[in-house]
Image (cartoon, rainbow, N blue to C red):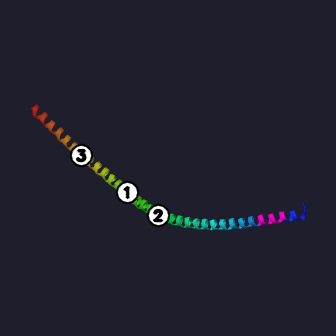
Amino acid sequence: MDSAEVSEIKRAFGVIAEGLHSEVSDVKRHVGVVAEGLRSEISDVKRHFGVLAEGLRSEIRQVAEGVSAVDARLSAFQTEVAREFEETRSMIRLSYTELDRRIRTLEAGHADLESRVERLEAR
């Protein structure tokens, strides 16, 4: 190989290298544009997710407040029902006591009447 062929090969490699360098620069620019677009889209997604997350937090707070209100009402209802049950038990005890007194009075009166009837019949 003589020096002219070597020079020609060097020139060809130089042209190829310059073409590759130009293509690599184009790819870098394109990758940069794509990366910037992705950053922008990721930023939009983050912003959108933040809005959705805040909306969910607000809804969760509303549900928690509702549950708290229902819990308070349920506790008050349970207290009221327990008090009413106790009042009912007291009234039933009082009614049974009154009924027992009346039955004993009737039984005593009946026994007294039976005794009088037996005495009358015995005469």
Q: Amino acid at mark 2?
A: Arg
Q: Earlier in the sequence, mark 3 or mark 1?
A: 1
Residue annotated with mark 2: 61
Main SS, magenta region, reads helix
Q: Which residue is mark 3?
A: 99
Q: CA distance from mark 2 to mark 3?
A: 56 Å
Q: Tell me the crowding category of disc 2: few under 14, some 14 to 19, or many 20 or more residues within 10 angstroms, Cα based.
A: few
Q: Earlier in the sequence, mark 1 or mark 2?
A: 2
Taking 48 as reference, is 112 left or right?
A: left
Left or right of 77, for residue 35: right
Using the numbered discs, state the Cα–Cα distance from disc 1 to disc 2 in whole angstroms.
Answer: 27 Å
Task: Identify the residue position indicated by label 1 in the image.
Answer: 79
The type of residue carrying mark 1 is Thr
Q: Are marks 3 and 1 in contact (CB under 8 Å)?
A: no
In the rendered image, the quadrant that contains the N terminus is bottom right
Q: Secondary structure at mark 2?
A: helix
Give the farthest residue toward the left. Answer: 123
Magenta residues, start to end: 8-17
Category of crowding for the residue at label 3, using alpha-carbon neighbours closer than 10 angstroms: few (below 14), some (14–19), many (at least 20): few
The residue positioned 88% from the left and 65% from the top of the image is 4
